[in-house]
Amino acid sequence: IGNSYNMAPAVSPDGGRIAMISNKSGNFDIYIISSKDGSIIKKVISGERSSEYEEMHILKPGISWSPDGAMIAFSAKSGKSDALFIYNLKTSKVVKHRFDLEGVFRPSWAPNGNIIAFIGNNGYSSDVYTFDLDSQVLSNKTNDMFSDDQVSWSNDGKTLYFVSDRQDGLLEIEYIDSFQTDIFTLDVLSNEINRITNTDFNEQFPIHSKDIESGNEYI
């Protein structure tokens, strides 16, 4: 949006809109823009003007669309702690969900339902969490002392992808943070975790995609 600091673009399910964070106004706000020409459709959240949206997490940003494109999910520091927000684009209604967590980052909406995955920090470690909007059940899916980040969904909603510094065969009591991350999968039903990469590099932002013509799937 012009000469602004723009981040965390998220394309709507129909491909016609992009939700993003921008400091076009001087503060970090959330805008909906056209994916065709970049024109502003609507500013949906005015951030950093009150304690409700005190900080928009520009270091760990994330916006995610509901499968029907009617709502977006985002997180922000709100008063005493972080919160998960659901914004209805049709009614402009905002619903806030506060958990017993210090940090809530990078929400990712399941492609086939009302479950949102995110990275939660309890003050000691960062884990992969899911929150069911229908049942209001919060689940810690990894629940260990390793550092997890950048969670996303498989296309069928059965698997979560994330990066972590966890190491095979390493007990938690032996754990020393090496800051080297690989990609892992997590089965949503069983919570089984499997390593996808094992390199000396820092893998980041895993995304599941499928080639329409060949049918091949990629991460």
Image: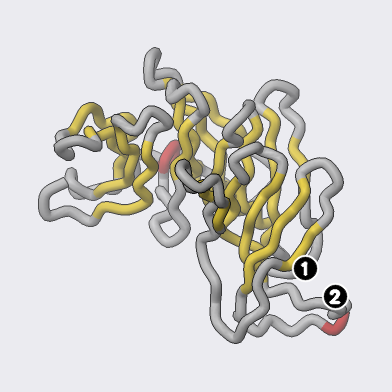
Above or below, comparing residue 122 to residue 175 in the picture: above
Identify the image quadrant of residue 195: bottom right
**Which residue is farthest top?**
91
Q: Nearer the viewer, residue 203 or 213?
A: 213
Above or below, comparing residue 172 to residue 68 in the picture: below
Residue 108, percent across and down? 55, 43
Q: Amino acid at mark 1?
A: Met
Q: Left or right of 126: which side holds 189?
A: right
Q: Amino acid at mark 2?
A: Glu
Instruction: Using a 10 Å C-alpha cutoff, classify the residue at mark 2 as few (fewer than 14 neighbours), some (14 to 19) or many (20 or more).
Output: few
For residue 49, say whether it is visible. Answer: no
Instruction: Using a 10 Å C-alpha cutoff, classify the residue at mark 1 as few (fewer than 14 neighbours), some (14 to 19) or many (20 or more).
Output: some
Q: Which mark is residue 145?
A: 1
Residue 161, percent across and down? 64, 55
Q: Nearer the viewer, residue 135 or 181?
A: 181
Quadrant housing the C terminus = bottom right
Q: Secondary structure at mark 2?
A: helix
Q: CB atoms at circles 1 and 2 under 8 Å apart?
A: yes
- Residue found at x 87% / y 78%: 169
User: Is tag 1's residue or tag 2's residue first in the polypeptide sequence?
Assistant: 1
Q: Badge 2 is on which residue?
A: 172
